[in-house]
Every structure is written in structure tokens, then in C-alpha cells.
Image (cartoon, coloured by chain):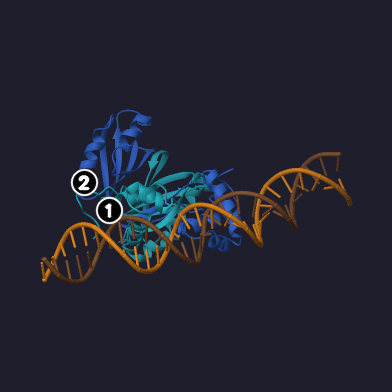
Chain colours: A blue, B cyan, C brown, D orange
Amino acid sequence: MDDIDRALLAELQRDAGQPYAALGRAVGLSAGSAHERVRKLRERGVIRRTTVEVDPEAVGRGVLAYVMVQSGAWMGGAATGAALAAVPEIEEAHIIAGPASLLLKIRAGTTAGLQAALRRVFEVDGVTGTQTTVVLETFFERPVDPAGGPGPAGGR
Amino acid sequence: MDDIDRALLAELQRDAGQPYAALGRAVGLSAGSAHERVRKLRERGVIRRTTVEVDPEAVGRGVLAYVMVQSGAWMGGAATGAALAAVPEIEEAHIIAGPASLLLKIRAGTTAGLQAALRRVFEVDGVTGTQTTVVLETFFERPVDPAGGPGPAGGR
DNA sequence: GGTGACGGTGGACGACATCGACCGGGCGCT
DNA sequence: AGCGCCCGGTCGATGTCGTCCACCGTCACC
């Protein structure tokens, strides 16, 4: 995990479809070496998968909201995760520190759809309340910055 | 934007690297047709880009937090967006309805790094306060569900 | 009922990923 | 300090895949 790996990650985040020759050129390596590096990044799990970024608006998911969930029981079990995963509108689910137990990111088509998703959240065992924050406008949503955090931290 | 397009999007989100022949098989089309559909989805902007999902832990971004930002002025201007985008730890920035003005998603390497990022947020014009929620554990983070929202809504 | 346009199929060509052999530098061992 | 091993990079060859084109069927609109 050196600077070249980080540059490769940045390039791949920008465009994962470009040929390995171009990738190599961008980081000062041959196509073969670039390929080998990327293979190892995948193997180590640094690259989880190559995917496609979809416009939420275009697939009828134009309403974005964050929901704080209060609960009367410990919600860290796998059952809770599975119950939340079963709601397709929920894009992220986190256990948080603070007065609430859970933080959800929900994308629905309309406010009515948002309401329906919230109803399903209430049906999850242990949930006692929710507090919803609706997003009016998004400045940006971007991938993880691969340019290291503290020092040469992170992977192995 | 029919069911086949949605199936294509789901397949591409799962693995954008698979050959078009496999893609076509998955949705009951020939490789050429699948290619043409995907090309149009890109052209219409439904597919924004093909990218790579990076493990945040592996690149030294193991600390995740959400930050509500209070402000003394309207923060919807492009200048605010640019100032926030200049902080690499900020992964998302939204304008929200409610007592706070902004919601940020921040990924740092350590709690010290989180503190440093918060300091930079405070230096943005108009910011008067922050309220940070630290994530303890993430159940899941997944891509947008392309299986439509309300009805046949969304794109054109 | 005719006609035009759109979407799908199959095949041909060229580009690209993928693999192997060779080479150079760095490090540890003796 | 010399020697040999190992990791990583370059170059070249082969097979696969993306990409384009011409043909055909279908549907909708006149």
C-alpha cells in the first residue's frame, strides 16, 4: 500500500473501465504491472468490487432522508441488521453513539414512500421512536478518499 | 427505463466487470443488445460512472461520523460547497430541513483526524456550531436500489 | 394495409486483458 | 564484501471480449 497503490485506487474510482495501459500511464507503470497491483488490491480486499454509480433520481429515488432511531433494547444483533436490510429504501444502517441507537440513510421515491419505509422501520423489534431529517439539496457524494488518513496507516 | 434496464443496473452494480455476454444472459438478451442498452443508460446519465468500491479501513479511514452543522447565514451557495469539498475527509455534504443547516458524512483515520476535520469545518464562513455523531458499527452500506420507487417514476 | 422507426440478433474485426519468460535491484545470509 | 534469493517490473504472445455493422422482426402510426 504505497503511493502508487493509492494513485491506482484514485484512478479506478474515477473510471474503472479504462484500459490497463492508460492506468499504467497514469501512475508511471507498464500495463502488466498495473494489472498485477490491481489484482493484489482486489485479493487483499482493498477493492471490494467494481460497480456502477446510478443516478437516484433516474430510478425513482429522488427523496433522501436520514433517520435517527431510538430503541428500548440493544440493536446490535444480526437480526436487526437483517430486518433493516429487508427494506430496500434503506441504503445505510449504522449503530451510533449518543441518545439514538441507529442512524439510517433512506432513499424513497416520494414523501409517501418515505413514510411507508418509516412504517416498516417501526415494525422492527425494539424500535421505539424515530427522528427524520429530510435532505433538501446535496452538495456532493463522493467515494472514499484513498490518500491515506493519519500517516502510513490502514491495511497490512 | 423498463424492467430489463433495471435488471441491467442491478447486475452492473453487483459486478461492473463481467462480460456483456454474461450480462445479456442474466437479463435474457444478446450481448449486442445488452451493450446498446448500457450505452444508452450511460448517455442518459442514469449510469454516472463505473467505479470501484474501496475498503475505508484499508486506506486509513476507519473512523466514521455524521455531523450536523449550525450556521448563522444561508449556506446553500456554491462557495460553501467548494469550501466543504476542499476537506478530503468529507464524503457527503447535504443541506437539510430542520434546526441544523448542513449534514456532513466524515471519514477520518483516527479521532484526532476527525477533530482536525471538524476544525476545518468551523473555518468555513457562516458555521456557528457542530454536533457530531460517531458511528460504532456499520450494518451495511449498499448502492441505490434500482427497482423503481413509487410507480414507473423517475427518468424520462 | 402500407411504411417507417426502433430494438434485437449474429458475425467479423480489432483492441484489450491475461499469462509466461526474462531481467534488474534490494536484502539477508554466509 | 560477495553471493544468491526473492520481489517487482518490462516485454511479448495468445485468447477473449468489446465494438461495430448489416439484416430482420415487430410495433405504431398514418
Residue at point 26% right, 37% down? A121
Q: Which residue is under mark 1?
A: A59
Circle 2: residue type: Gly
Q: Position of residue A107 (x, y in %)?
A: 28, 48
Residue at point 37% right, 62% down? B80
Considering only vertical position in the picture, is D24 above or below A65? below
Q: Where is residue A60 in the image (x, y as percent from the top left)?
A: 25, 52
Residue B12 shows up from this direction? no
Q: Which residue is under mark 2?
A: A113
Residue at point 55% right, 54% down? A6
Nearest the camera: A11 or D27? D27
Q: Would you call the spot at circle 1 few (<14 residues within 10 Å), some (14-19), or many (20 or more)?
A: many
Q: Which mark lies nearer to you, 2 or 1?
A: 1
Circle 1: residue type: Val
Give the CA separation, mark 2 to mark 1: 14 Å
Nearest the camera: A76 or B49? B49
Q: Which quadrant of the figure contains the C terminus of chain B?
A: bottom left
